[in-house]
Amino acid sequence: MQWSLRIARVSGIDIRVHLSFLLIVAFFAVGGSQHGALGAAHGAATVLLLFTCVTLHELGHSLVAQRLGVPVKEILLLPIGGLARLGREPKTALHELLIAVAGPLVNIVLAVGLAASAYGLWGSLFFYGALDSLASGTPPSVQGLVGTLLAANVMLAVFNLLPALPMDGGRVLRALLSMLWGQARATRWAATIGQVLAAGMGLLGLYLGHLGLALVGAFVFYGAGRERWSSRSAEALAQLQAGEVVELEAPRLAPTDTLGEAVDRLLRSPHAAVAVTLGPQLLGVLHRDHLLAQIGRQGLGGIVAHAMQPVRHVVAATTPLHVVRAELNAADGAHVAVVGEEGLLGLLGPEDLGRIGALATGLARLGIQRPGVPAPLPVKD
C-alpha cells in the first residue's frame, strides 16, 4: 500500500504501518503534554503499546491462517486499526472459524496476563486505581498505563466478537451457519444480523451524542453490505467460465514493438494491461502503470521485450470465474492469462472481474438467461 513503511517481518509476513499513523502518535503526545514532557512521552508510549496489541491480534489471525495453508500478504496498521490481508479465503468453515477466533483469543490472553501481573505487583487495589485513572485523567504512571492496556485488550476482544460481519464475531457466526446451510446463505444471514446490530449501534451513538460509536456503526453496516455483495457476486461468477467473458479481440503487442506503440494501443483500449505474444506463444504482459514507469527509464523508443513482466497465473478457458477471482486475489493485482485449445484467448484483471461480477449479479437477481447459456439461479436474500 502507498504511504506505508515496513517495520517488521514475522514468519515471512510483512508488518507495515501507514504514515498517517504518526498523526495518532502526535495527537496522544500532545494530549499528555499537559503533564509536561513525561506526560507527552507517556501518551506516545500508550498509543504505541496499544497498536502493539492490535498487531498481536492480527498476528493471531495470520499465524493460524498460515498453519492452515492460507497465504498472508501483509499486516497493515492504520489509524483506525489493523488489517491482515489474506491471499485467499479459507477453504472450509472450520478454517474460517479458527482464523477468526484467533485474534480475539490473543487479546484475552494479553488481558489475563496483564491482570495477573498487576495483581502480583500491586494487589487488588490496582484495579480500583486503574479505573480511577481512566476516569479522571490522573498524571501518568505505570499503573495507569497497565490499566489502559488491560481495558483496551478487554474492549478489543469483546468488540471483535460481536456477531456482526465483517467483525471477527461475524465471521465466527458465518462459519457456524455455513456448517448448516452453506457459505452463500450463511453470509446473507450473518450480513443481515451485522447490519441490524450496526444500525442499533449507530442509533445509540447518535442518541448518546457519541460520534465515535455512530461512526463504528456506519463502518460495520457498510462492511456487512460489502460481504453480502461479495457473496452474491461469487454465486453469479460461479456460473460463468473464463472463456465466456474474456475479450478475444483485445490488443496485443509483439516483443519488438516500441513503448510508444504500446502507448498507442492502450490509449485506444479500456484495458489496464496488454498481452505480449510471438505468434501463438504468450511471452509476458505489460501493465499500464509499469509501462509508464518504463517510459520514464527507457523513453518511448524502448522495446516492449525489455519492459514486459512474466505471466505467473494461467487458467483454462473452462475455469469458473469465482476460481479466477481467487487467483486474482492471490496475484495481488496482476492479470490472469486465459488459454484455450488454440493458445491464448486473452487477459482478465481485477477491474474486469469487478465489471463482470456487477453485471452477472444483476442478471442472476433477475433470473435472466443469456442466449446459449443455462439460466442462472436467482440470488435470494
Image (cartoon, rainbow, N blue to C red):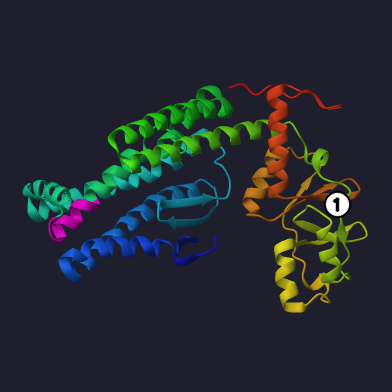
Residue extending furthest toward the right: 279
| Other residues around mark 1 within 10 Å, as few (<14) / some (14–19) / many (≥20) | some
Identify the residue at image location x=44%, y=31%: 194
**Where does residue 2 sit, x and y in percent of width and height?**
54, 63
Q: Nearer the viewer, residue 156 or 176?
A: 156
Looking at the picture, does residue 332 appear above or below residue 323?
below
Is label 1 in a helix, a strand or a loop?
loop
Count of marks, rendered view: 1
**Disc 1: which residue:** 250
Snapshot quadrant of residue 291: bottom right
The magenta stretch is 138-149
Looking at the picture, does residue 145 appear above or below residue 233?
below
Identify the residue at image location x=43%, y=47%: 61
Identify the residue at image location x=72%, y=75%: 296
Q: Nearer the viewer, residue 18 or 88?
A: 18
Residue 45 visible (yes or no): no
Looking at the picture, does residue 107 appear above or below residue 214?
below
Q: Quadrant of the N terminus?
A: bottom right
**Where does residue 266 sit, x and y in percent of width and height?**
81, 59
131 relative position to 340: left or right: left
Instruction: Reply yes or no: does residue 14 show up in magenta.
Output: no
Q: Quadrant of the C terminus?
A: top right
Q: Nearer the viewer, residue 323 or 98?
A: 323
Q: Nearer the viewer, residue 306 or 44?
A: 44
Question: Which amino acid, mark 1?
Answer: Ala
